[in-house]
Amino acid sequence: MKPPEARGLSVLLVEQNLHLRKVLVEALQGRGHVLTVCEDTESAWEAYRREHHPLVVLGVQDRRDDVIQFGHRIRSVPEGSSSVLLYVVEHRRARPLQPLLEVADDCLTKPLDPDLLQMRLLAVERLAAERAQRRAAEAERARLQKDLQALQGSAAGATAAGHEDDGARSEPHGPSGFRGKVWRLFGGQRETEEPPGNGKAFPSGPSNEAGMAPFAQVLPELARTAQPQFDEAADAPELRVSDGWWDWDLSANTVTFSPQWKAMLGYRPEDIGNTPEEWFKRVHPDDRDQLKATIAAHLDGRTPHLENQHRIEKRDGSYASMLSRGLAFRDTAGRPVRVTGSHTDITELRGYDPLTGLPNRGNLMERLGRALDRARSGNGGVSAVLFLDLDRFKNINYSLGHRVGDEMLKAVSTRLRSCLRGQDSAERRGTTVAHVGGDEFAVLLEGIRESSDAVRVAKRIQDELQAPFDVEGHEVFTSTSIGIAVSSPDYERPEDLLRDADTAMFRAKALGKGSFVVFDAGMHARAVSLLKLETELRRAVQREEFRVHYQPIVELETGKIAGFEALVRWQHPDGELLLPKDFLTVAEETGLIISIDRQVARDVCKQLRVWNAQFRRSSPVTVAVNVSGVQFLRPDMIVEIDRTLRNYGVYGRSLKLEITESVIMEHARYAADMLKQLKALDVKLSIDDFGTGYSSLSYLRRFEIDTLKVDMSFVSRMDTDDESWEIIRTIVTLGNNLGKDVVAEGIERGKQRELLLALRCKYGQGYFFSRPVDADAATALLVADARGETLLKS
Ligand code: C2E
Ligand code: MG
Ligand code: MG
């Protein structure tokens, strides 16, 4: 979820100094806010009382405390608690900071640093958004409460009461009533393009809505997350402001940490005490020394101010990247007496993944980009990207829960980091382990000699990750599939290298768990053509480019047509008629097969209706339709088939479903249930490709199956290979004993028909009789059949 949209807030700016005012106005307008600018607190109060601005920016002159008092005044009204107060202070203030910290949500120091200003504004905007949401949720709750009371209690006039605060807010107002100097300024483009407040032009509209409008859209969402308890807050970090304060009293050696900072780390205010250790102990061990050194350097007077980025552990064990800035206050002798500063969560800016603390995808791309640049300028050597995917990680998430899944990812990160640490040699410039999303990691190896170096690293990683993980008391095993792409001058963009490593990883997955594959150019071509196929297939589904061909199933003895098998064809717009082997795999992987099978079933039922009316036969024509495993595993399949049959007025018994042996046997329990329901529709059932899987005899007996289809591979070899003949003999005997029809597929020669007849196999299908043909040709075959002509060749 994105952070709530905080732009277009109604902001009250109080600043005397002309120059500073200009800077602040520009910054605030640049961020799309609507400003009310006041020179003094008197007129500011007037403005605030009417509008209750969600954000108030206050400049504090060195010798004037009235602005701090103004903050308290705001806080004294009920609405004031949700306004965000951002103070701009002189950083050499000699006076204690405490009064300011009591009322301020955040502070900026003069002279203004433009970057810091933007960052702070972002932070206070978020806070304002969060508070507005909370307020709105509270109002909503109050309203519901009221409605409830109205329903329960005294009926007198309690129904549909207007919302009090709406009434107060919609009171018309304008700048005319203000004393002192007050300006009303709209943010940036909004001024010309679209007046704020849902098209109600200032000044007549309730301008507070200008700031509220975006939040209203997220209200329903918020109603659920409205109480920012700290535990839940971990699930909705975007609702929290990302800035905090600290104030270190050096003589007492105590630090006041702001509640925001504690909340940023997932703690309640009382969870963290006021010793410096509370801070340092949470800092990542690799970053702790440099943080302390930075602070020491500033206290010693070696740096004008303090600035440090470090990773800090949150309550949930994940790491945030923190930017800490600070300034020492010194006594007359120049000795530091206190240090005060800020904490800004820059996890996203900095490019680290919060869960694992590893560089994220963007960060990796930057490093890879630099490596490629160096290689191009001739002094970088070769780089390789290893794309890692944990096999069956989803199972861990599903079976043990997301918490364990997260812990697992952290454990993997740690192990990856330690197994790659210290591997850099003189020629190896660096190794980066990144978390690129979900259960996917990437390793960038810079300055390797050849791809075999990368292969060696891949193997080591696979070995390391194979050992069991102890995650919250669970012993978890994983294997890792790795794709490797090695840089070459052909690569211009870092994303391409990562993409190719990803493609290779997919191939590795296909080879089996725990494999690795080095990318080659052919793979890219295949990946591209697969993607193209998928795109075209989607379009084909929309445009209904699929045709059904019919292949007769004949009585082997007489050559009379017993029915047909429907086989799908894709009439590609470029003129080619494509066979299932060209597109079925992609159709199944993408789920498009469901729509395709739906179209086939519909066309078949349409055709059956025509044939049943046209041909009066002793037994009506049946058509067998192939059902993909994907569809068979959908519980709504039954309903859909029932609907199609009804739509076209076709009896269930005219339709036969072909389901492959493996799908049925792998999901035996479910299949038994499905088959029973299909039987209730009187639909006939056939097991396709029989003999290729492992059928349990007991299932076969129990399942309500009408037909076994002997797989073509046995039929094609039966006249030369004894074993195939033997298998067919067994299947036919089995079928005859269980009272099921047996259809032999793929009969191409007369000899095969004779052998099958000798085995007492009753039905057959194959090029010997007819190839699959379109509906018209199939109709012609039925006409001939009705005339007594048979499909037997002399
Ligand atoms: P299948 O269900 O085993 O279909 C039999 C396949 O063998 C068909 O290939 C058919 O054209 C081919 N065939 C029939 N007689 C002979 C013969 O004498 N010699 C040889 N060499 N081949 C013969 P096709 O049409 O290419 O279909 C291949 C597979 O695609 C089918 O195997 C079926 O599993 C699947 N399929 C076809 N149509 C559909 C459909 O509408 N939906 C789904 N889900 N799968 C389909
Ligand atoms: Mg079939
Ligand atoms: Mg088959």
Image (cartoon, rainbow, N blue to C red):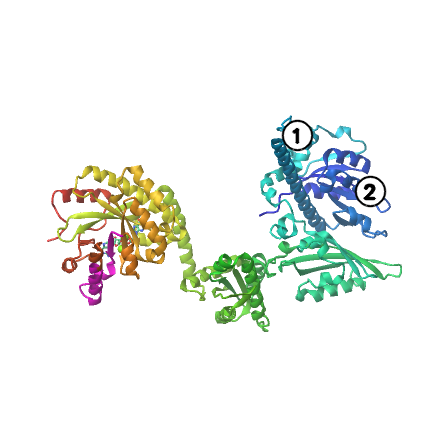
Q: Is mark 2 within 8 Å of ligand 1?
A: no
Question: On the image, which quarter does residue 6 sit in?
Answer: top right
Q: Residue 467's spot in the image, x, y percent?
A: 51, 70
Residue found at the very far right of the displayed protein: 332
Looking at the image, can residue 18 be seen?
A: no
Residue found at the very far left of the displayed protein: 794
Task: Say the numbered circle drawn on residue 69.
Answer: 2
Q: Of the residues under marks 1 and 2, which one precedes in the sequence?
A: 2
Q: Residue 663's spot in the image, x, y percent?
A: 34, 56
Q: Residues within 10 Å of mark 2 (few under 14, many from 20)?
A: some
- Between the C-alphas of marks 1 and 2, the distance is 33 Å
Residues at circles 1 and 2 in contact by the CB criterion of under 8 Å: no
Q: Residue 790's spot in the image, x, y percent?
A: 13, 48
Total count of labels: 2
Residue found at the very far front of the displayed protein: 153
Q: The disc labelled 1 sits on which kind of residue?
A: Ala
Name the residue that disc number 1 marks.
201
Q: Is mark 1 within 8 Å of ligand 1?
A: no
The residue at the point 62 percent across, 51 percent down is 232
Of 307 and 254, nearer the camera is 254
Horizontal arrangement in the rendering, residue 63 relative to residue 401 (left or right): right
Horizontal arrangement in the rendering, residue 58 relative to residue 442 (left or right): right
In the depicted structure, whether residue 7 falls above or below residue 582: above
Residue range (magenta): 705-733
Task: Say the numbered circle drawn on residue 757.
Answer: none
Question: On the image, which quarter does residue 30 sit in?
Answer: top right
